[in-house]
Image (cartoon, rainbow, N blue to C red):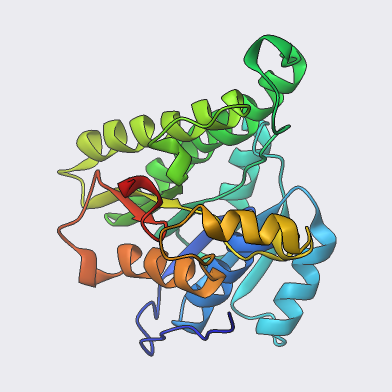
Amino acid sequence: MSQTFKIIENEFKGRVAIVTGAGTGNGESIAERLYAGGASVALVSRHIAPLHDICERIDSSGKRTIPLEVDVRDSHSDQIAINSIIERFGKIDIAVNNAGITGPANTPLQDLDAEIWRDVIDTNLTGVFHCMKYEIPAMIQNGYGAIVNMSSANGLVGLAGMAAYTATKHGIIGLTRSAALELAESNIRVCAVAPGYVATPRIVESGKETLDYMASAHPMKRLATREEVADLVAYLLSERAAFITGSVHCIDGGYTAQ
């Protein structure tokens, strides 16, 4: 399904955003959506090459984007990235902690390699902790902040064969709620977004059989578009959501209502 963003012009004018996992998929679209709304955006990924291409596409002048090669598993790397953003743009207002991996599918827990478990946990959950650890002090200093952590519909229900992924997505929700309570009086809001299956390039390239299966898992019988996810994230980061914090927002076509 082809769709365009629902842009509110200059909604994020003067804001500085960081988006992790911005090299493809939801992260790319979220970064583009925030930029289109007026924000300056730091795009973060383990792989720098796609970020250069995205920045060139959305911001050929290079005035409001910066690509940063960061492995969110490495706390020191995350700290350097935050410092680089502040050095370039002067502050951080908005964060979308989206970087993540799925790990293997259809693997019973007892057959899951411990090294794979650690990689998924370190990327998806500890990586979000690392990012928030350095984003939050910058926002406190700034006197304002809004954070969206990307969970999943499977952070609200079980998913057989993907224990590590499911555990991290549940964990992100707990981390989000705890941080929201800690920051409730600091003018910093923290929410989580829980998408169902989304028509990212990787998913689309997986073939018709997989696409049909994923669509059928949703009562609405289709996948979400990246633009729909990005618009929800943008709403939660905006002043329109000024009294929303500590909450989880599904965009799953009814998946978790079943």
Give the answer, above or below, for where 82 lies relative to 110.
below
Label tally: 0
Residue 176: image x %, image y %? 34, 38
Viewer-proximal residue among 127 and 228: 228
Q: At 62% across and 42% down in the image, what residue appears?
A: 100
Which of the 4 image quadrants contains residue 205? bottom right
Of the 4 image quadrants, the one containing the N terminus is bottom right
Residue at the extreme top of the image, as rendered: 110
Task: Examine the rendering and report whether any part of residue 224 can be seen.
Answer: yes
Say left or right for 51 vs 39: right
Residue 149: image x %, image y %? 44, 47
Say left or right for 6 vs 88: left
Q: At 73% across and 74% down in the image, what residue appears?
A: 54
Give the answer, above or below, for where 95 lies relative to 181.
below
Give the answer, above or below, for where 216 lies relative to 28.
above
Say left or right for 44 vs 10: right
Residue 81: image x %, image y %? 63, 48
Viewer-proximal residue among 31 and 88: 31
Task: Examine the rendering and report whether any part of residue 86 can be seen.
Answer: no
Say left or right for 85 vs 39: right
Residue 107: image x %, image y %? 70, 24
Viewer-proximal residue among 14 and 1: 1
